[in-house]
Amino acid sequence: MDQNEISAVNTVCSKNCFATCPLKVYVKDDKVIKVEGNNNNPITRGKICAKGRVYPEIVNSKERILYPLKRTGARGEGEYENISWDEALDLIYMHFEKIRREDGPEAVLYYQGSGNFGVMRKYAYSFWHQFGGYTGTIGDLCDPAAEEGMKYTYGWRTQNSLEDLLNSKLIILWGGNPAHTNIHAMYFINEAVKNGSKLVTIDPRRNESSSKSTLHIYPRGGTDGLLAIGIAKLLVENSIVDNNFIEQYTFGFEKYKEFLKEYTVEEVCRLTEVPLEELNKLVELIKENPKYAMMLGYGFQRYTNGGQTIRAVSLLPAITGSIGEKGCGIYAGESQGTLLKWPYFPEEPTRIRLSIPKGRLASEIEKIDSPKIKAMWVEKANPLNSNPNVGKLKTTLDKLDFIVVTDSFLTDTAKYADLVLPAASFLEEDDLVAAYGHPYIQLKQKTVSAPGQCKKDREIYRLLGERFKLDMKYLPKDDIEILSNVIKYSGLNITVEEMKNKPYIPEDYDEIAFRNKDFKTSSGKIEFYSEDIFKDWGVNQLPVYEEPFESKYSSKEDYLKYPLQLITAHALERINSQFTESKKLNDIFTPVIHIHPEDAKVRNIDSGDMVKIYNQRGEVFVKAKIVEGIKIGAVNVFEGLSESTKVSVNNLIEDMITDMGFGASYHTCLVEVKKLDK
């Protein structure tokens, strides 16, 4: 082919997103010139979001790191000099080997984030297991409370196909905003509404997905579990119960009914700040449509009570038997990633210390002893932007001897590294990617060569493996051969060659989740009452409600000083801290705080005013935007703002973890807002 010709390559977006969109990438002279959606997936239908369309700008950005960088200034200043790969590998070997010899391998903290998905993420462990061990993290920043809550209630997390939403007569959208975070689900929701389905939204803010709602309920943040208890109580009291389903497929319902008696509807309405009239409207809608679909967002599980909240909410469809049939069920994500098995694991060493919850990284690193953490390796992550309590985390990282970051850009975290390694982008590598928003597994094909001296993470590990004289059979070189072996080892009935043109769907996939009532709990049933959850996490066997750790009732002294509850929703133009490199997206993404007119009035704030958001942990400066569609007493700032521009709201958030799953409780946060003098 003439180098001047344009070629099209099928690949897939592997960012941390429900959609996992197949892409058609147009390439000329080994450069990405355009990205479009690929219509070979019936869920995504050839559509992609605004973020997907700016990939040419990002992969061709002049801001990309092209060479290994060695820090020359103070941490955080971003002053570096280019060095060779040989120098970089020598530095890593020198520091890590010294630490391993003198302190043990656990003195190195390995931190992998969710910046890029795919089975090749597991390649890292082919190195770290042979290193002899490491200190690792537990839990996640995203949805571990939801995952655990679903596991102890239904046995695992799966859902009806998104297309089945078209069969729903009632859709309850609880704590999510698919218009920003799951655009293909939003398409099917909109189509269902066009066909006569009723949409109910439950969220403290009138988000971009709720405009067509028949009913919008605005609970006080963190009280979703209590709201679910109130709804359940009304369903039971009004005999809106599928007794046959309950008897055959659930466990502990009688104990659950007794538990509901401990709550009054009046107490529920007072604490959730939801009028009884709205509760009754929702119950009436469920009575009219007892087989309904419920789509769960991740926002309401990011409180300290998140796991029990998920349990309380997810049990509602079970009461009316709205599970295992068309047009109903719970949409909380798929678990297809577990289907991809890694055939290159060496023997697991005994000195792996998995002890630091990701959501408490700032507090836990210093607590670790015998040995203390001396060095840190960061990949696919930007913890100095994405993690809670960023200010404290900076102080903690400053005390480490050696920090290595692999990234394509000089992120907030990369600026704190002693050594930054230039990473290939996702369009410059091959991989297999499983979605968590639909059932398809897709091939990510390399579309262009990595620029400069950028390398894939696995290339870096292979080079380090040679330095450390590791067994290289666990660190293979040929990507296509690796993926072929993954497919074979995982028992998938397809080849890499076939996947270049079509996604793979497991042969036993059923578009109706739990059609066969295959609940993988200890009882084999949906568990209203779970002994396992008490044994494993020490929480109540029933989905009891507890106030979030930081709220108007649980921390009254703080509430007097900081009376607004901070929400940090996902923005359309960001995935966590990613896409800040796009000028096109930055031009349409203005950092603002959404505040209700009544809250703005008492603070003498007008739209456009520069304000300070603050609490005992830090302060952030943004412009105010007065909006009717947010609950009084709550404010929203979209996540993904850069720490370097002093608008990272994670400065304000304590690094507390959820009641199960070791998740980050981002929304457990009280603040105050003050207008700044002009």
Image: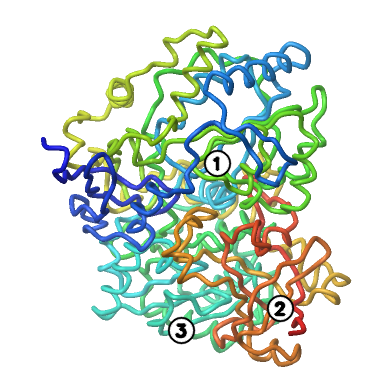
Q: Are marks 1 and 3 in contact (CB under 8 Å)?
A: no
Q: Is residue 598 left or right of residue 169?
A: right
Would you name the residue on which mark 2 appears?
611
Q: In which quarter of the image is the N terminus?
A: top left
Q: Quadrant of residue 167?
A: bottom left
Pair 1/3: label in front: 1
* Residue 113, label in figure: 1
* Whole-percent x, y for residue 155 in the image: 48, 44
147 up-or-down from 273: above or below: above
Distance from label 3 to label 2 (Cα)? 32 Å
Q: Quadrant of residue 293?
A: bottom left
Q: What element carries label 1?
A: loop
Pair 1/2: label in front: 2
Q: 235 and 333: which one is in front?
A: 333
Residue kind at label 3, given as amino acid type: Leu
* Residue 365, label in figure: none
* Whole-percent x, y for residue 287 in the image: 41, 78
